[in-house]
Amino acid sequence: MTNDPGLHALPSTVEFGGRELTITPAVVETERGLVLFDVGPADSGAVNALETHLRSLEYDLSDIWLVVLTHHDGDHAGALVTLLDRTDAVVAAHREEVPYITGDRAPIKSSGDRYPPVAVDIALSAGVRFPTLAGPMDVLETPGHTPGHISLYFPESALLVAGDALVADREAPLSGPKPRFTADMDRALESVAELGTLEIDHTLCYHGGYVEQGAERIREIAAAARE
């Protein structure tokens, strides 16, 4: 769990690809309601888990007004259609990710099956900033894991919501992207190096959750990859 006012990690264990998977969506409070980062896999109970978390925070699913997808992979976007059946949320994703989410292209890592496609209301790019109760939230382009992968940065609290640009579920508290699941590893490591130039004190990863490590560790990851 983060210590930042208005930002809440929502970890849960779900079924995906025939195995148990721990994921960490998150929400940030705004004057308009909640912004949700990623959802979870289809048919996994992910939306019910989100609802349980939100009730503990004295919110409901209907308080989500915006869903920001870090990228189109099924473990992040698969349950989006279920969530939209129960909310009036707007959907935002990077413009490079939009055709995969809407069904115009097959997901890059799909073996043929895909989650139900949904419309994307807002196409994001670097430089977009949202006001939140945790301070301004900047959209960062961090491609490599997928072509249009994004991360979210809260400069006032030096917090990075990394998506899959970084992971925290290995022996090291914070690690680089996993080659097995990364479409373009060279570009992904360039994104890691770019993140290392920011003032980051702590990081929230979709896989592994919250860690009190930031730019120093991120620079170590980038340096090790160059060796």
Image (cartoon, rainbow, N blue to C red):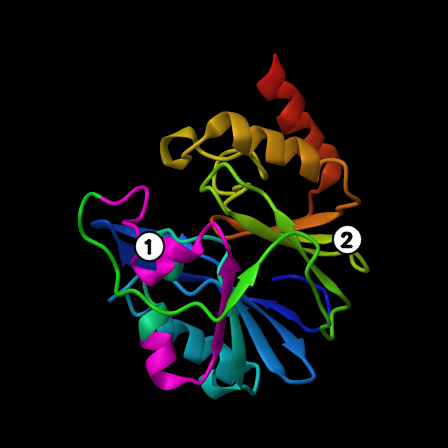
Query: Is residue 32 rendered magenta in the image?
Result: no
Give whichever of discs 1 and 2 has the lower sequence position. 1
Q: Residue farthest to the front? A: 104
Q: Tell me if I can see residue 210 in this picture.
A: no
Q: Residue farthest to the left? A: 112
Which is more foreground, mark 1 or mark 2? Answer: 1
Q: Residue at x 30, y 51 (%)?
A: 105
Left or right: 21 in relation to 113: right
200, above or below 118, in the image:
above
Residue 77 spot, x, y in % from top left: 38, 60
10 Å neighbourhood of mark 2: few (<14), some, or many (≥20)? some
Residue 214 spot, x, y in % from top left: 71, 42
Between 123 and 86, the one nearer to me in the picture: 123
Q: Give the amino acid at mark 2.
A: Ala
Kindly report the distance in space between the C-alpha atoms of the residues bearing marks 1 and 2.
Answer: 29 Å
10 Å neighbourhood of mark 1: few (<14), some, or many (≥20)? many
Q: Is mark 1 on a helix, strand or loop?
A: helix
Q: Give the amino acid at mark 1.
A: Gly
Residues in magenta, as a range = 82-110
Left or right: 63 in relation to 47: right
Between 225 and 191, the one nearer to me in the picture: 191
- Write down the residue under mark 2: 158
Q: Is mark 2 on a helix, strand or loop?
A: loop
202, above or below 60, in the image:
above
Residue 19 spot, x, y in % from top left: 25, 49
**Residue 210 bears which disc, if any?**
none
- Write down the residue under mark 1: 74
Query: Is residue 91 rendered magenta in the image?
Result: yes
Q: Residue farthest to the top? A: 227
Residue 78 spot, x, y in % from top left: 32, 62
